[in-house]
């Protein structure tokens, strides 16, 4: 038996194609309380959430050091104004780290800002691994924002198999990006 966690909207919870008997909403604090014999993290159709939460959760599933995903801005006057307005923003994301490169881009003509992480690296590593069982992530092309960052971070940190599902016409076609030495059914 394994746990299945669906992270997303109420539409996901009502879906008939996903198991619901052991489904739970996951947070950094609940990872240790889950059964350690296998975990499916299903983020299909998830529009995102808080970026910090997505990257803080990664640390609970791996002993590896988490390097938060770098983010770039397209160099435009509007993005420069947005970063200035949200420099040292105590109520949200601090966009100050991108100011120098966006200012410089107006002189050099660079298309993008420097790549910097949104999530503080110390926060992405302060708890460490709390879930030690096998983990499988299921995602799709309808994931955005923090969910996309979570999926990318999972792949970047080699966190276990990642399954990607995409919708084409009225059927699903599965693509698997899995370690060749692991068999999904044998791992869980």
Image: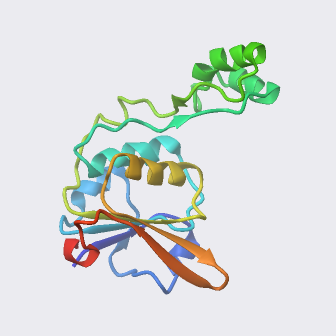
For the image shown, how many numbered marks are present on the structure? 0
Between 124 and 182, the one lying in front of the other is 182
Q: Position of residue 120 (x, y in %)?
A: 43, 30
Q: Left or right of 166: which side holds 122?
A: left
Q: Left or right of 73: which side holds 116?
A: left
Q: Is residue 1 above or below residue 139?
A: below
Furthest residue to the front?
Answer: 180
Confirm whether residue 171 shows in the render: yes
Q: Position of residue 126 (x, y in %)?
A: 29, 34
Q: Position of residue 155 (x, y in %)?
A: 40, 52
Q: What residue is rendered at 51% in x and 54% in y?
A: 147
Q: Tell me the quarter of the image containing the C terminus.
A: bottom left
Q: Is residue 88 above or below residue 123?
A: above
For residue 74, which quarter of the picture?
top right
Q: Tell me the quarter of the image containing the N terminus.
A: bottom left
Q: How is the image coloured?
A: rainbow
Q: What residue is rendered at 25% in x and 73% in y?
A: 183
Between 8 and 72, the one lying in front of the other is 72
Between 188 and 130, the one lying in front of the other is 188
Q: What residue is rendered at 31% in x and 35% in y?
A: 125
Confirm whether residue 88 shows in the render: no
For residue 78, which quarter of the picture?
top right
Q: Position of residue 90 (x, y in %)?
A: 57, 25
Q: What residue is rendered at 20% in x and 67% in y?
A: 35
Furthest residue to the right?
Answer: 77
């Amino acid at each position: 038996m394994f746990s299945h966690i669906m992270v997303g909207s109420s539409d996901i919870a009502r879906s008939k194609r996903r198991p619901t008997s052991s489904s739970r909403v996951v947070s950094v604090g609940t990872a240790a309380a889950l059964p350690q014999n296998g975990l499916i993290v299903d983020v299909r159709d998830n529009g995102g959430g808080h970026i910090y939460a997505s990257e803080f959760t990664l640390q609970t599933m791996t002993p590896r050091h988490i390097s938060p995903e770098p983010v770039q801005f397209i160099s435009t006057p509007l993005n420069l104004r947005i970063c200035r307005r949200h420099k040292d923003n105590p109520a949200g994301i601090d966009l100050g780290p991108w100011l120098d490169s966006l200012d410089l881009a107006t002189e050099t003509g660079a298309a993008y800002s420097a790549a910097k992480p949104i999530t503080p690296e110390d926060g992405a590593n302060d708890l460490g691994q709390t879930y030690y069982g096998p983990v499988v992530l299921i995602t799709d092309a309808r994931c955005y924002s923090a969910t996309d960052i979570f999926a990318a971070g999972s792949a970047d940190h080699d966190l276990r198999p990642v399954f990607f599902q995409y919708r084409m016409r009225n059927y699903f076609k599965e693509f698997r990006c899995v370690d060749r030495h692991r068999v999904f059914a044998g791992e869980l």
